[in-house]
């Protein structure tokens, strides 16, 4: 029972390109003939958390995530399919790219938070971010205090004050 053939929590149906059997699209490989499934059908309907069998939540065990990432790459990396037909190599390349994107997004806390917002329908666009005048004024005051600090001790005192707020 490899991680690449595990259940991905999906409920939609696909038809295997090799054996033509219909099955739930909850595996990377066909459950009947073990042929690599069409990544277009699988990846379009899965989120990054499902790929790694993780709950959709901000808190993740990064060591476990990395372990799952390496396991998936071992099973689905295009090099594993290099002696096979071009179609399988192309599908493995698609999966590998998707897994890399998913891992990159989930391992970084900021990217993970943005991805969760996207999944919840609340995408965050940094370019449209509006900062409150009060917040901007506070930042200005802090920068001014830092630039007016005459010694290292004053900077340490400012840092301590900022950490308390």
Image (cartoon, helix red, strand yellow):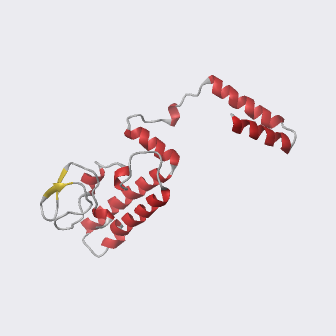
* Residue found 35% across the figure and 55% down from its top: 51
In which quadrant will I find the N terminus?
bottom left
* Residue found 33% across the figure and 59% down from its top: 95
- Choose between 3 and 44: the one closer to the eye: 3
- Considering every residue shown, the one lying at the far top of the view is 133
Residue 67 in the image: state x and y as whole percent.
Answer: 44, 64
Residue 131 in the image: state x and y as whole percent.
Answer: 58, 28
Residue 91: name its quadrant. Answer: bottom left
In this rendering, position of residue 106 left or right of residue 3: right
Picture layout, residue 118 above or below residue 18: above
In this rendering, position of residue 73 left or right of residue 45: right
Residue 24 in the image: state x and y as whole percent.
Answer: 19, 54
- Considering every residue shown, the one lying at the far right of the view is 150
* Residue found 69% across the figure and 26% down from its top: 137
In this rendering, position of residue 110 left or right of residue 48: right
- Choose between 112 and 55: the one closer to the eye: 55
Count of picture labels = 0
Residue 34 in the image: state x and y as whole percent.
Answer: 21, 67
């Amino acid at each position: 029972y490899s991680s690449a053939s595990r259940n991905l929590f999906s409920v939609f149906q696909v038809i295997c390109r090799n054996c033509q059997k219909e099955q739930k699209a909850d595996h990377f490989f066909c459950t009947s003939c073990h042929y690599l499934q069409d990544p277009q059908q699988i990846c379009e309907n899965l989120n990054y958390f499902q790929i790694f069998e993780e709950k959709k939540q901000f808190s993740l065990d990064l060591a476990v995530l990395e372990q799952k990432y390496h396991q998936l790459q071992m099973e689905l990396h295009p090099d594993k399919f290099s002696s096979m037909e071009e179609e399988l190599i192309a599908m493995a390349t698609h999966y590998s790219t998707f897994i890399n994107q998913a891992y990159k997004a989930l391992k970084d806390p900021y990217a993970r938070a943005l991805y969760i917002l996207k999944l919840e329908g609340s995408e965050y666009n940094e370019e449209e971010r509006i900062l409150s005048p009060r917040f901007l004024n506070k930042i200005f005051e802090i920068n001014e205090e830092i630039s007016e600090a005459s010694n290292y001790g004053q900077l340490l005192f400012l840092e301590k004050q900022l950490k308390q707020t």
